[in-house]
Amino acid sequence: MPRVRTGPSTRKRRKKWLKYAKGYWGGKHRLYKTARLQVMKAWLSSYRERKRKKRVFRRLWILRLNAALRPYGISYSKFIHGLKLADISLNRKALSEMAINHPEEFEKIVELVKEKLS
């Protein structure tokens, strides 16, 4: 039985990892072992941060809503409760954008919520 030469497949596998590490600094894009470790770490970080981004943006929308509601004399939590009572199903992102870009429509929603709360 002839000997199997693994050179081409090994080189292909290693070049694949080095291609993923393109643009990394120093040996992280030149050396196979460090490139592979760095790429795996980067993939782990990007996976984690894709999940975290959703939480961060939700916090931002809540913060903006709370700031937009304070001049009307209502807190964020009471506003959300009033939205549920008024059967208005707008998400926090839409409400935040409305408060920034369309304050007159946002004010109408706030007045409607205040009526339902009282």
Image: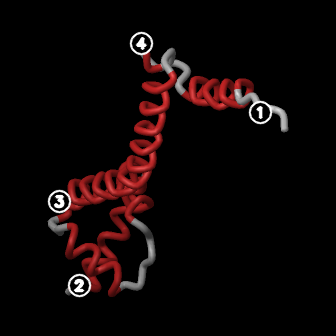
The amino acid pointed to by label 2 is Leu
Badge 1: residue crowd in 10 Å (few <14, some 14–19, many ≥20): few
Q: Is residue 19 left or right of residue 96?
A: right
Is 5 placed above or below 93 here? above
Q: Is residue 44 left or right of residue 66?
A: right
Residue at screen point 37% across, 62% down: 106
Residue receiving disc 3: 70
Q: Residue furthest top?
A: 26
Q: Residue furthest right?
A: 1
User: What's the distance in space between the residues labelled 2 and 4, CA to CA?
Assistant: 61 Å
The numbered disc on residue 26 is 4
Tell me where residue 19 appears, x and y as whole percent.
Answer: 61, 24
Q: Which corner quadrant holds the C terminus?
A: bottom left
Q: Sequence order check: which comes first, mark 4 or mark 1?
A: 1
Q: Sequence order check: which comes first, mark 2 or mark 1?
A: 1
Kindly check if marks 3 and 1 are in contact, taking CB atoms under 8 A apart as contact: no
The amino acid pointed to by label 4 is Gly
